[in-house]
Image: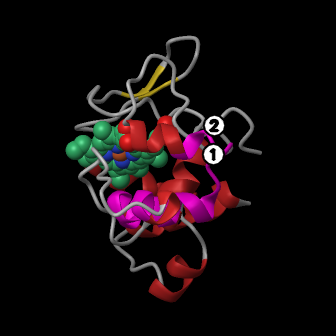
Amino acid sequence: MMKSVALSSLAALTFGLMAAPAFASAHADAAAGETAWRSCRACHGITDPAGTVIQRGGRSGPNLFGLPGRAVASAEGFNYSSALEQYAATGAVWTEELFVEYMANPTAFLREKLDDTGVRSPMSFRMRSGAEDMWAYLESVSPDSE
Ligand code: HEC
């Protein structure tokens, strides 16, 4: 279902037709998320456990493979900030809601979750819109996306 919606809106764009904006905002669009990946690639890649590269990217941020449902700050071999690790110690797992909140402002997110105005996220990027689409894209490249 999700895939056919994404494909049909991609097809609409390909043929130069405008996808109705109301429709696009009501349904997360994995294809739009994939397009927006260009904002992440300087710092993140997506590589599955077998080593298959889904998105080549920088290494200053953690591998985002399988993020939906993944424990916070759990990418193997990545040196997370102590603030995010402290939050992860509460047992937090990435849900869409949490992800959307984090993406809007990682520093504000950590300050609120840790109730500490002194912390700052090393992720300087803020995603002002389209985080739902990015979540749909990350789900589409996750192991149990169906
Ligand atoms: C300028 C570099 C940079 C950019 C651009 C960037 N990030 Fe990050 N991201 C980071 C860093 C560094 C961390 C580690 C944060 C920490 O340790 O507190 C991070 C952490 C994350 C996490 C937490 C992962 C986990 O394992 O818990 C998510 C989710 C995330 N980024 C998503 C994204 C997405 C999606 C984009 C693009 C829309 C993006 N980031 C763009 C640098 C970046």
Instruction: Magenta stretch: give its range.
Output: 87-111
The residue located at (63%, 38%) in the rendering is: 71
Front-lying residue, 26 or 85: 85
In the image, 68: left or right of 128?
right
Seen at 55% across and 30% down, the residue is: 74
Q: Position of residue 142 (x, y in %)?
A: 63, 37
Amino acid type for the residue under numbered disc 1: Pro
Q: Position of residue 79 (x, y in %)?
A: 38, 24
Residue tagged 2:
142
Q: CA distance from mark 2 to mark 1?
A: 7 Å
In screen coordinates, is 98 left or right of 128? right
x, y percent for residue 97: 60, 65
81 vs 19: above or below: above
Q: Relative to residue 80, is residue 26 drawn left or right?
A: right
Type of the residue with mark 2 = Ser
> Nearest the camera: 77 or 107?
107
Residue under numbered circle 1? 68
| In the foreground, 67 or 24 | 67
